[in-house]
Amino acid sequence: MADFHSTIESIPAAPGAYLLALELRRAVVLSVRMAGRLPPGLYLYCGSARGPGGLRARISRHMRRGKALHWHIDQLTERATVHGAWTFTDRSECALVASLADLPMPVAGFGSSDCRTCVSHLLHWTGSRRAFLTLGRHHAR
């Protein structure tokens, strides 16, 4: 089972994959290069962190405001509440997407422009807000 982290202190600095839990309270219009509109709601983003600082560095960046917009996900993390992330040192981001394939993918190519397997790495949570937040609390360290 994966560990859920709502703060960066407990996130390992190891390489791995993560599932970021986000909440948009208002609609977000994405940039021209990744055109689309996301309605308010709950979203999951599957990513990987293989560089220096591993999972801790990458997820810390997602939780921080005021950063330069570099990746697709930056457009959301600057406007959303990031509730936390599940971390996996033994799985890939594509494996996470595959395990959640029943969830809608609202924007094709989001976070997966360099991926030949996945339609998108952004998923729209269709369950209740309570279930979404309970998942994180249930698995929290």
Image (cartoon, grey):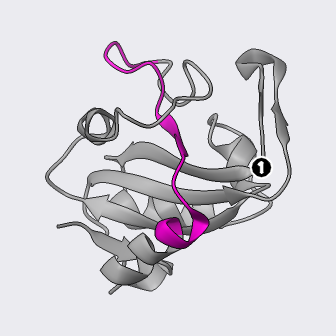
> Which residue is at the front of the view, 69 or 100?
100
The residue segment tinted magenta is 114-132
Q: Is residue 115 visible?
A: yes
Q: Position of residue 124 (x, y in %)?
A: 56, 42
Relative vertical location of residue 119 with respect to residue 67 in this rendering, above or below: above
Determine if the magenta segment contains residue 131.
yes
Q: Position of residue 7 (x, y in %)?
A: 50, 81
Relative to 20, 49 lies left or right:
left
| Badge 1 amino acid | Pro
Query: Residue at image x 37%, y 34%?
Result: 102
| Residue 36: quarter of image | top right
> Which residue is at the front of the view, 59 or 101?
101
Query: Residue at image x 53%, y 48%?
Result: 125
| Residue 32: quarter of image | top right
Query: Residue at image x 74%, y 42%?
Result: 75
Q: Is residue 84 visible?
A: no
Relative vertical location of residue 55 with respect to residue 138 in this rendering, above or below: above
Q: Callout 1: helix, strand or loop?
A: loop
> Which residue is at the front of the view, 54 or 117?
117
Residue marked by disc 1: 40
Query: Residue at image x 84%, y 44%?
Result: 27
